[in-house]
Image: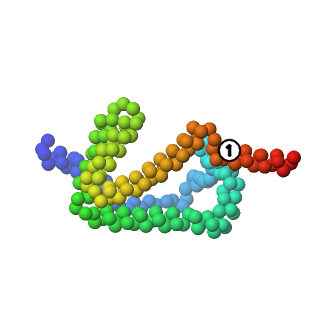
Amino acid sequence: MSYLGKIAKVAVPGALGLMSGTVFAARSFHSDTPEPQLRYKEPEVGHVEQAAASLRKTVEPYISWCQVCCCTDSSYYKTVEPGVNTTQSIVKDMYVFLNDPPSEFFPSVGVIGFSGILGLYLAKGSRIKRLMFPTGLMVLSTSMFYPQHAASVARTTKHYIFSWGSEGRVVLEELLRGKSSSKDKVEKTQKTASQKSS
């Protein structure tokens, strides 16, 4: 068979499948067979539908309570709305930034991501290593690309670590002495109450 014959065997059925046409059929008005009576039959309820219905019935009182309590109370909106607005502005800022990023942005993100993956590879062993190695390498890479931001974050972190350390030292001293300020207050109030009653 020639090459054109093979193409025709494949192309003609495919082309006929893409063609559209209208078929007109005639119906005889004097037919002996009656038209079938079509009846709608309700489908049987399945397990998923039963579970969804029972869940809806179980949760309905709680949902109605939430609608009455939360939706009518404006304090709910006052507490949620600032968070929603902040999230919305952050997402908009990110969208604007990523639409026109600086030329060094994507290479720096690539290096920082690669250092995190390298940290995961090097951190074989304990969970602490798997947490510290990638984080440390990513922080180191980030500080090389963004030194001003790294310096401000370091200052803020230093302040928080110093305050947490001071609070921890005070709590540890109280635990080592065996007395806490709350125990002292309870003992003083018990002594004054017993002196007044006698």
Q: Which image quadrant for residue 64?
A: bottom right
User: Looking at the image, which is closer to me, 72 or 152?
Assistant: 152
Q: How many marks?
A: 1
Going by the image, does 193 lie left or right of 179?
right
Going by the image, does 98 lie left or right of 184?
left
Residue 38 location, x and y as percent?
60, 53
User: Looking at the image, which is closer to me, 133 or 197?
Assistant: 197
Residue 86 location, x and y as percent?
47, 65
User: Looking at the image, which is closer to me, 99 or 35?
Assistant: 99
Q: Are there few (<14), some (14-19), or many (20+) residues within 10 Å of tag 1?
A: few
- Can residue 46 be seen? no
Please, which residue is most extreme toward the right here? 198
Going by the image, does 114 lie left or right of 93?
left
Q: Which residue is depicted at the point 63% across and 44% down?
A: 180
Q: Which residue is depicted at the point 28% across and 45% down?
A: 115
- Can residue 83 be seen? yes
Quadrant where the N terminus is found in the figure: top left
User: Looking at the image, which is closer to me, 46 or 119?
Assistant: 119
Residue under numbered circle 1: 183
Secondary structure type for disc 1: helix
Q: Amino acid at mark 1?
A: Lys
Q: Is residue 115 above or below residue 159?
A: above
Q: Which residue is depicted at the point 58% across and 67% down?
A: 78
Q: Which residue is depicted at the point 39% across and 66% down?
A: 92
Residue 102 location, x and y as percent?
25, 63
Going by the image, does 129 lie left or right of 77?
left
